Image (cartoon, grey):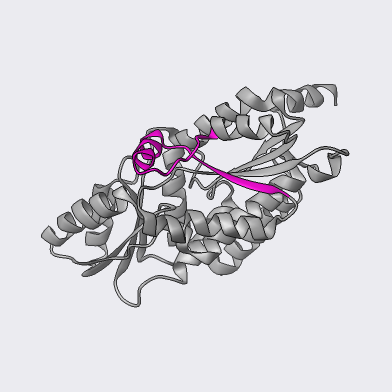
């Protein structure tokens, strides 16, 4: 019965999202273009200094975006200044979002969609939205796509992906970066969705937020778990995956007596996750986020 209820809720959330309810309204970006206008898609990634994971995550989704949206020029930017600096020393130059946007402006692009591969509406998205707001006057229109986990429907989709990829035995622990902002509640929410869907052997923890390592440890003990598979809930399997998950978390759990495996796979490697991001681009091409001030003004007149 619970599964049917969640299926109904999921379909309802998808329909609402697709129809532009909530804080979005239907608006086709490309249909507003006039002769001489140029459209671009800027893919924004936190970035990674690991060549092998970049190839199967960032490069892979950039290629998928180019194939899905041939009518737009596709560019990329990295938001991590530390990673940009590391790569520059190796001769690999990556622009930050502001630099990439100003370059597009200088090349005459008038309509731009900015899509990050961030997991949730945290500080990286906050920074990205500020960069976009700073250059918005230079474009006829610029829109920002939503992160991976934005709506309840997004979380249901991602939960379904991991439910289909859980190990044959033991418990799967997904470890996210975490944040000090209230957005850390997103991790707790998708953890709740796993449990509500009956996937009681899938747990979500974070390195710098909530749920914490201790939260996950308590749940594993309560479940009398013996075998644990750790996996990054991050777009790339970079420093945090190698040092914190495959290092500290694995060592601590083994000291507690668990048999621990590590699935060194960034979420960006998973085709279904890539498709969710592509769907977000498709959505923002046909919908525009409402200005809450204008929305309230309309309510006042009704």
Q: Is residue 279 shown above or below 291? A: below
Q: Can residue 156 be seen in this view?
A: no
Residue at image x 88%, y 39%?
A: 35
Residue at the extreme bottom: 168
Q: Quadrant of the C terminus?
A: top right
Estimate the x, y position of residue 137 in percent, counting from the top left: 71, 23
Q: Quadrant of the N terminus?
A: bottom right
Q: Which of 160 and 222 is in front in this view?
A: 160
Q: Is residue 85 shown above or below 68? A: above
Residue at image x 71%, y 28%?
A: 291
Residue at image x 39%, y 39%?
A: 88
Q: Which of 117 and 27 is in front in this view?
A: 117
Q: In this view, does 244 lie to the left or right of 282?
A: left
Estimate the x, y position of residue 169 in percent, counting from the top left: 31, 76
- What stretch of residues is rendered in magenta? 72-97
Looking at the rendered structure, the number of numbered marks drawn on it comes to 0
Q: Is residue 296 shown above or below 157? A: above
Estimate the x, y position of residue 168 in percent, counting from the top left: 35, 77
Estimate the x, y position of residue 290 in percent, counting from the top left: 72, 33
Q: Is residue 62 left or right of residue 198?
A: right
Q: Is residue 123 visible?
A: yes
Residue at image x 41%, y 52%?
A: 234
Q: Quadrant of residue 9?
A: bottom right
Q: Does residue 75 belong to the magenta stretch?
A: yes
């Amino acid at each position: 019965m619970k599964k049917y209820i969640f299926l109904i809720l999921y379909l309802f959330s998808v329909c609402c999202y697709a129809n532009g309810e909530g804080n979005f309204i239907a608006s086709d970006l490309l249909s507003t273009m006039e002769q001489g206008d140029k459209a671009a898609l800027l893919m924004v990634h936190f970035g990674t200094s690991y060549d092998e994971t970049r190839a199967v995550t960032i490069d892979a989704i950039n290629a998928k975006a180019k194939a899905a949206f041939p009518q737009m020029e596709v560019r990329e930017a990295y938001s991590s200044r530390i990673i940009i600096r590391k790569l520059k020393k190796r001769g690999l130059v990556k622009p930050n979002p502001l630099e990439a946007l100003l370059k597009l402006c200088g090349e005459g692009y008038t309509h731009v969609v900015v899509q990050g591969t961030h997991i949730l509406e945290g500080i990286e998205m906050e920074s990205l939205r500020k960069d976009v707001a700073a250059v918005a006057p230079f474009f006829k229109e610029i829109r920002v796509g939503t992160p991976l986990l934005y709506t309840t429907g997004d979380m249901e989709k991602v939960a379904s992906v991991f439910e289909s990829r859980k190990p044959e035995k033991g418990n799967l622990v997904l470890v996210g970066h975490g944040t000090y902002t209230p957005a850390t509640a997103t991790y707790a929410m998708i953890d709740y969705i796993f449990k509500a869907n009956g996937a009681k052997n899938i747990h979500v923890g974070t390195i710098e937020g909530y749920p914490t390592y201790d939260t996950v440890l308590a749940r594993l003990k309560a479940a009398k778990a013996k075998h644990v598979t750790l996996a990054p809930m991050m777009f790339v399997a970079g420093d945090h995956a190698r040092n914190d998950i495959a290092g500290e978390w694995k060592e601590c759990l083994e000291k507690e007596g668990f048999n621990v495996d590590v699935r060194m796979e960034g979420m960006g490697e998973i085709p279904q996750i890539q498709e969710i991001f592509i769907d977000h681009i498709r959505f923002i091409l046909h919908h525009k986020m409402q200005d809450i001030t204008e929305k309230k003004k309309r309510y006042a007149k009704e």
